[in-house]
Image (cartoon, rainbow, N blue to C red):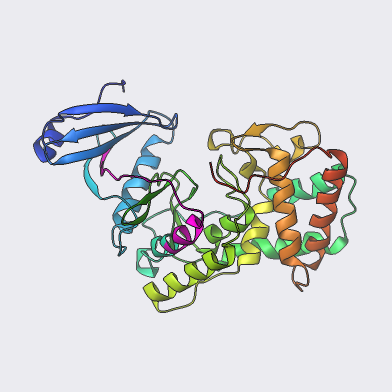
């Protein structure tokens, strides 16, 4: 696939011939253009050749079609698809700079996105995959490398946590990377884009992003002041859409994220090495923060959230001790940003 606009005869017959086009910035996994068609502006996205390109393309198409049920809209309209070229043509939306309380509108839209699917949609997207025993072992090994004592009960707590997250199930439409930059703040509300990693699972998995600091994102941030209002907006929007309470436990979801070393690197580097094992020896920057900054933030969040928990008491003490050890070793570590870029 080249860099020319991939707008073949089928798309031209359906949407007309593009009058103008302009290449936009995108990830290395895709090419994106803004085009002007006879009926107005649109966005063309082509998935770049790669071992998982077909899977990512199919995932995004399926997720966009499922999310189109949301009202008000939470995704751009899917105007046309060219499966042979792995091309999507999407409604063009005008993004405006988010306000100071952007996270409240974001959370409400995220809930409506999650609520677009239900039990009848099982199998329409991959099932969300949580942490596993490999993650537990890597996390406990990091604690030992930081010379932090690991109480005997912690391993059992973490095994039970992994089981709970796995059995939680759920049929929410998860974005997979609901980060600042994948949310468009338009005059008619927040819309989400880039569903290459979409799955079905518990909405708590992504509501946890607000507290744990957007773990799969280049632009990690600490939640701004309206966090409580944002979480309330999520629950209110979910109830309005489904008539039920959100499924899952937010504390468990945040604890699950702190175990995952792959949430310290961009997607292309995941499932390659034990990233937690590197932390004692080397730091690295991804986007707005370093790996150590990200981990210190997450440890603090989980320590506070699990304080007084009967199921994760040992983890609360362990995460607090790991955070203290990291700050003592690297006293120049700064908090993660509080404002989105």
Q: Which residue is drawn at 61% across and 61% down?
A: 253
Q: Residue at x 88, y 43 (%)?
A: 328
- The answer to whether residue 299 is left or right of residue 317 is left
Q: In this view, does 50 lie above or below 105?
A: above
Residue stretch rendered in magenta on the structure: 87-108
* Residue 162 found in image quarter: bottom right
Q: In the rendering, at what x and y percent does residue 282 appear?
A: 76, 31
Q: Does the magenta stretch include residue 94?
A: yes
- The answer to whether residue 50 is left or right of residue 211 is left
Q: Where does the N terminus fall, quadrant-wise?
A: top left
Q: Is residue 117 above or below residue 333?
A: below
Q: Which residue is drawn at 66% across and 32% down?
A: 285
Q: In the rendering, at what x and y percent does residue 290 appear?
A: 68, 37
Q: In the rendering, at what x and y percent does residue 267 appear?
A: 54, 38
Q: Is residue 132 visible?
A: no
Q: Is residue 76 magenta?
A: no
Q: Is residue 271 visible?
A: yes
* Residue 335 found in image quarter: top right
Front residue of 101/16: it is 101
Q: Is residue 101 above or below residue 15?
A: below
- The answer to whether residue 12 is left or right of residue 196 is left
Q: In the rendering, at what x and y percent does residue 5 appear?
A: 25, 26
Labels in figure, total = 0
- The answer to whether residue 204 is left or right of residue 115 is right
From this viewpoint, which residue is outermost toward the front?
A: 100
């Amino acid at each position: 696939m080249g860099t020319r606009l991939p707008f073949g005869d089928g798309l031209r017959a359906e949407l007309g011939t593009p009058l103008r086009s302009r290449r936009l910035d995108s990830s290395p996994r895709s090419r994106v253009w803004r085009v002007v068609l006879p009926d107005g502006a649109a966005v063309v996205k082509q998935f770049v050749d790669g071992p998982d390109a077909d899977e990512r393309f199919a995932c995004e198409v399926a997720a966009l079609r499922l999310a189109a049920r949301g009202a008000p809209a939470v995704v751009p309209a899917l105007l046309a698809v060219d499966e042979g070229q792995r091309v999507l043509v999407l409604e063009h939306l005008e993004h405006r700079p988010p306000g100071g309380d952007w996270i409240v509108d974001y959370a409400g839209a995220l809930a409506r996105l999650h609520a677009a699917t239900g039990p009848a949609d099982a199998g329409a997207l991959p099932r969300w995959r949580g942490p596993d025993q490999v993650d537990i072992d890597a996390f406990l090994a990091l604690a030992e490398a930081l010379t932090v004592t690991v109480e005997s009960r912690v391993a059992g707590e973490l095994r039970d946590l992994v089981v709970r997250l796995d059995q939680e199930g759920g049929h929410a439409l998860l974005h997979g990377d609901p980060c600042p930059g994948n949310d468009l703040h338009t005059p008619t509300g927040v819309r989400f884009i880039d569903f290459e990693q979409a799955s079905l699972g518990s909405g708590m998995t992504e509501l946890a992003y607000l507290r744990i600091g957007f773990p799969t994102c280049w632009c990690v941030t600490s939640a701004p002041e309206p966090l409580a209002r944002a979480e309330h907006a999520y629950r209110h929007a979910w109830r309005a859409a489904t008539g039920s309470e959100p499924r899952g436990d937010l504390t468990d979801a945040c604890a699950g994220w702190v175990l995952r070393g792959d949430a310290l690197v961009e997607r292309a580097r995941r499932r390659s090495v034990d990233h937690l094992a590197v932390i004692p020896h080397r730091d690295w920057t991804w986007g707005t923060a370093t790996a150590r900054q990200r981990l210190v933030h997450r440890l603090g969040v989980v320590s506070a959230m699990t304080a007084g928990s009967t199921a994760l008491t040992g983890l609360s003490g362990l995460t607090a001790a790991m955070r203290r050890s990291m700050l003592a070793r690297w006293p120049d570590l700064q908090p993660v940003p509080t404002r989105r870029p």
